[in-house]
Amino acid sequence: MRRLMRVLLGVEAVSFFLAATIHAGMLISGYEHHEAMIAESIIGMVLLSGLIRTWLRSRSMFTTAIIVQAFALLGTLVGIFTIVIGIGPRTVPDIAYHVSIVVVLAVGLGVARHGRRTEMM
């Protein structure tokens, strides 16, 4: 369970960093969006910080995972809101990414909650 949690946090962080580099125009041109790049970079850093913390303070790893993934989910929902109201990027890849990462974050939160309950017993 601990390894799965760390893998999920790593995958989530990398996916946000990749999205940020795309919105920075570094990987693919035509999808530049400065505000999205900043938000994705911050979320990626929070997730990476949480991943690092799971090794430094492994006793509280599932609590840490819940906190950082909840932050990432909230940020992603804000991103979806900006897409809906027309402020955020409205491309098919952006919409697909947001929907996909919400699912991944929800799974990660479920794993973290289960792991936390299991460790408390």
Image: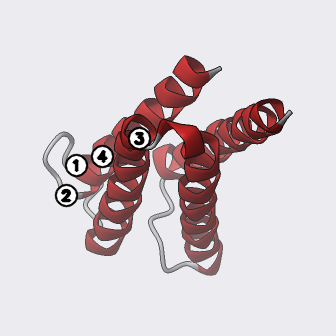
- Residues under labels 2 and 1: Cα distance? 5 Å
- Residues under labels 3 and 2: Cα distance? 24 Å
- Residue that extends furthest to the left in the rendered view of this protein: 26
Asked if marks 3 and 2 touch (Cβ < 8 Å), the reply is no
Q: Which residue is mark 2?
A: 24
Quadrant location of the C terminus in the rendered image: top right
Q: Dot 1: few (<14), some (14–19), or many (≥20) neighbours within 10 Å?
A: some
The three-letter code of the residue at mark 1 reads Thr
- Residues under labels 3 and 1: Cα distance? 20 Å
Q: Nearer the viewer, residue 3 or 58?
A: 58
The three-letter code of the residue at mark 4 reads Phe
Q: For residue 24, what is the image quadrant?
A: bottom left
The three-letter code of the residue at mark 2 reads Ala
The three-letter code of the residue at mark 3 reads Leu
Q: Residue at x 30, y 59 (%)?
A: 41
Q: Which residue is mark 3?
A: 51
Q: Which residue is mark 1?
A: 21
10 left or right, relative to 77: left
- Residues under labels 2 and 4: Cα distance? 10 Å
- Residues under labels 3 and 4: Cα distance? 14 Å
Task: Find residue 26 and report its horizontal and vertical position in percent.
Answer: 13, 47
Task: Find residue 90 and report its horizontal and vertical position in percent.
Answer: 51, 62
49 left or right, relative to 27: right
Question: Is residue 30 placed above or below 33 in the rendered structure?
Answer: above
Quadrant location of the N terminus in the rendered image: top right
Indicate the secondary structure of the residue bearing disc 4. Answer: helix
